[in-house]
Amino acid sequence: MPTSTPRPEDDSAPYGQIVDPWAPQTSRRAQRQQARRESPASRNAASAPRVDPGAGAPLAYELLRLSNVSGASGGFGRLLRSMFGSDTSAGDLAAAAHEAQAAVTTGRRIAVFSTRGGAGTTTATAALARVFAAVRQDTTAALDLSLGHGSLGLRLGADPAAGRSFAQLVPDTTGGRLPTAAELHAMLVPITDNLLATASAPAAAGPPPAGSLVRETCANVSRYFPLTLLDCPAGINQSTTASALADAHAVLWVVPATMSGVEDALAQLSGPYLRQLVAAGRVVVLVTQLDRKAPVTAAAQAQRLHALGYEAHALDYDAHLAAGARLSLNLLGAERRMALAQLAGRLVTNANAAQTSLKAGRRP
């Protein structure tokens, strides 16, 4: 078998450099060009990061395109007009809207959470905020309690420069400091005439606020609003979420329509903490359909939980919800609008009837 014979060592190789004797022959000119490329100046230029100036710019086109993805087969106005006709689903929508319009004499907090990320917690919060703003005359607040850059502002179309994040609200709403209604209004981002929200934080700026500060901020903000929605971080043992749940008048638990999601829900519901919340009548479960073609449906899993004695609702797949951009009710399918209106009504009813805290007789 023929073998390759190593070439004589090239005297032009720098001292101490290992030369591969089987490497292709390099011409003197190519060696000089390689040496220039490896010069310190060239290395410094090559190591400098090349940043596309447009890489960090807002994806305006994508946001616009995804915000207009529709899951609806008809206009929202046509659906509302049909409320005065013979359409039974329109009558159900009117009844659900009536329940969501119930008078709230004291600011009520509705905490939305999930035990796992990606379940649709923020989507549910944004959708409920839109429903309340559409059917109620008073003003609703939506607070993003995420530790870092939450997406509630994105789903509501909030300008991040027009208000403060939840973490930025804490110093001005705790330690005996209570802003006036006008001051608090200026701290939040106006979404509609009767919907305000926190801005998305640029990034996590440190550890989350202490649980006592979270509770104090939520209580002080909700003093000015009949309904305040709290978009909580994933995880029931997460300190911010646990603090929000402790004083919430109603709790919406978002569960993905997967076998692991529902099994996790059943395991958590058998635990002592959630069992207390369920016994107090504060927990409503929302099973969300994340995949149009998933073999496990939200309706079937919600029925399964309902058969076990839990109040469970289903939210089927909707292309507009799945797009992940600014959420608009008129682009949702009629069945999803109906489900959200019914869910909003049940949460208002639970919030009006529930005790404020697990501690007997304690009220904010």
Image (tube, helix red, strand yellow):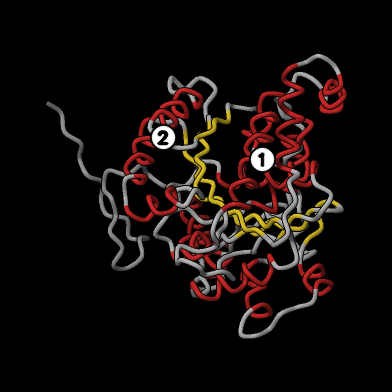
Give residue 165's mark. none
Q: Between residue 302 and residue 258, name the one nearer to us.
A: 302
| Label 1 – label 2 distance at C-alpha | 19 Å
| Residue 112 position within the rendered picture, expressed as x and y whole percent measured from the top left | 56, 50
Image quadrant in which you'd find residue 181? bottom right
Label 2 environment density (alpha carbons within 10 Å; few <14, some 14–19, many ≥20) = few
| Residue 171 position within the rendered picture, expressed as x and y whole percent measured from the top left | 64, 80
Q: Residue at x 73, y 17 (%)?
A: 88
Image quadrant in which you'd find residue 221? bottom right
Q: Which residue is mark 2?
A: 309
In the orientation shown, which residue stands out farthest toward the bottom? 176
Q: Between residue 186 and residue 270, name the one nearer to us.
A: 270
Tell me the element at label 1. helix
Q: Which residue is mark 1?
A: 345
Residue 18 to residue 41: above or below:
above
| Residue 23 position within the rendered picture, expressed as x and y whole percent measured from the top left | 32, 44
Residue type at mark 2 is Gly
Image quadrant in which you'd find residue 120? top right
